[in-house]
Amino acid sequence: MSVGGIGGGGMSVDRVMALRAQILEKNQALARAGAGNTAATGSATAPAETKPASFADTMETALKQVNDGQNQAAKLSDAYERGETIDIAKVMLARQQASVGFEATLQVRNKLLAAYKDIMSMPV
């Protein structure tokens, strides 16, 4: 897993929910039409991102993405708990995405600490 992929750099929650809505609509149309063929064509191309200049910038960007994912999940959970009309699937997807981002960040931290310890224990 690359550091740039931490925090859901791929698909956003809104995008997944839009795809889910499209799939549900197509399923309903198929059910009404019987056995009709409807082709779904959609390109999922992400905009090109500029690469950060240094390792510190890369880590800062990754941590901000993870933090943003955590904040979005918390906002959606709070809104759902207050009784606002939020799709439970959207809430759960955001929470899972935030959890995966956090776990990936934790693994990167563990690898960095292990590398630091290895370097510090090398004889000079």
Image: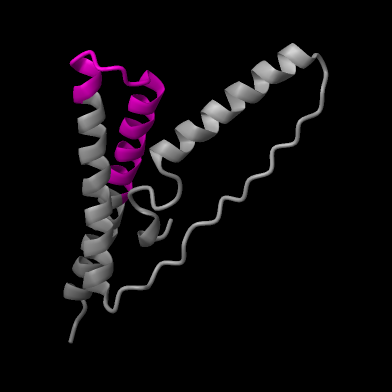
Q: Main secondary structure of the magenta part?
A: helix
- Which residue occupies the extreme bottom position in the image? 124
Where is 105 relative to 70, above or below?
A: below
Tell me: 44 left or right of 61: right
On screen, 9 above or below 117? above
Task: Based on the picture, tell me whether residue 103 belongs to the magenta stretch.
Answer: yes
> Percent position (x, y) of residue 82?
18, 16
Left or right, 55 with respect to 29, comes to left
Out of 45 and 55, give the one closest to the viewer.
Answer: 45
The residue depicted at 41 percent of the width and 43 percent of the height is 12
Residue name at image x 63 percent, y 45 percent = 42
Q: Which residues are magenta?
A: 78-104
Q: Quadrant of the N terminus?
A: bottom left
Residue 16 painted magenta: no
**Residue 23, position as x, y percentages in the image:** 60, 27
The residue that appears at 23% across and 13% down in the rendered structure is 83
Colouring chosen for the image of the structure: one colour
Q: Is residue 36 toward the left or the right of residue 90 in the image?
A: right
Where is residue 122? Give x, y as percent.
21, 78
Q: Residue at x 69, y 43 (%)?
A: 41
Q: Nearer the viewer, residue 38 or 72?
A: 38
| Image quadrant occupied by the C terminus | bottom left
Query: From the viewer's perspective, is residue 96 above or below residue 45?
Result: above
Q: Position of residue 104 (x, y in %)?
A: 33, 49
Q: Nearest the camera: 84 or 4?
A: 84
